[in-house]
Amino acid sequence: MLVKKILGAATLFATLAAPALANESDPDLLRVALLPDENSATVIQNNKGLQAYLEAKLGKDIELVVTTDYSSMIEAARFGRIDLAYFGPASYTIAKDRMKGEEIDIEPFAARSKDGQTTYQSVIIANADSGIKTYADIEANNPQVAFGDQASTSSHFAPKFTMINEGVEPGAYQENFVGAHDAVARNVEIGNAQVGGLSRPIFESMLAKGTVKPESFVIIGYSDPLPQYPWVMRTNLNPELKQKIKAAFYDLKPENPEGETVLKPFKADGFAPVTDADYDIIRSIRKSIQ
């Protein structure tokens, strides 16, 4: 039985119960949502530096929120219950699609930059004892394949799209959604799933930390480059506040103490400007596999 990581934060429930913020263009409290890619308590703790930095830069109280899953985050954005959010590329496009024509909308303004690049990859991994080493082996063995969240770019859409391009159709394996990237790696490591797909940066971070052992895995392959996770904001925030938010993110530099603290959890050198059009490739991937 695959192990599913259940994620959440106590603040989520108060946030979702709060009145929509559609008419609050310059609130005293900004709710900042972070993706539930890993354990929620870990995500919150890792981003205390971001919270302090934004409070100092914006002169606002900042509340960090980690929703139970991607769908909850999308719905919180739709109803104006979060002000800033760090979305996955696919979940951003899903949220944007669902908000089309509605009173509340979101816009991307920054993405993680690493070594001057605003792209990243998925990795497709296999359990080292499974005998699966190639895409052809997946096709031949009808394995259990672990994905993260159904709305995840690098832990669902991209690895599935990559396998299709390599001749492995979804019917050739049994898919299971285990919630988070780290849960994918752990399920593959212990053999609950023979194959898994997740974010390459997250997987490599887990290896570097010793959370999982490299000898437990075979790397089958990587996806094509994907646009990085976007930071988004409510479009109806005060224009001056929006400019302050953008400047706060663009000004972060790893050589500065506050920049190093904020950027380290994102494994980033900084944040670079992005637009909605940068995510058209994600829309194409979603369309091709849905």
Image (cartoon, rainbow, N blue to C red):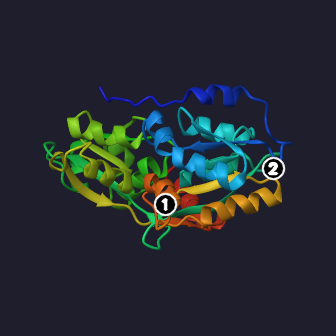
* Rendered position, 72 above or below 217: above
Residue 101: mark = 2
The kind of residue tagged 2 is Gly
- From the image, which quarter does the N terminus lie in? top left
Q: Is there CB contact under 8 Å for labels 1 and 2?
A: no
Residue 95 in percent (x, y) is at 65, 47
| Left or right placement of residue 228 versus residue 26 in this view | left
In-front residue for pair 52/29? 52
In-front residue for pair 17/189? 17
Q: Which residue is mark 1?
A: 257
| Left or right placement of residue 210 versus residue 183 in this view | left
| Left or right placement of residue 85 versus residue 42 in this view | right
Q: Residue at x 55, y 52 (%)?
A: 90
The kind of residue tagged 1 is Pro
Specify which label sits upstream in the sequence, 1 or 2: 2
Q: CA distance from mark 1 to mark 2?
A: 42 Å
Residue 62: mark = none
Residue 13 in percent (x, y) is at 63, 25
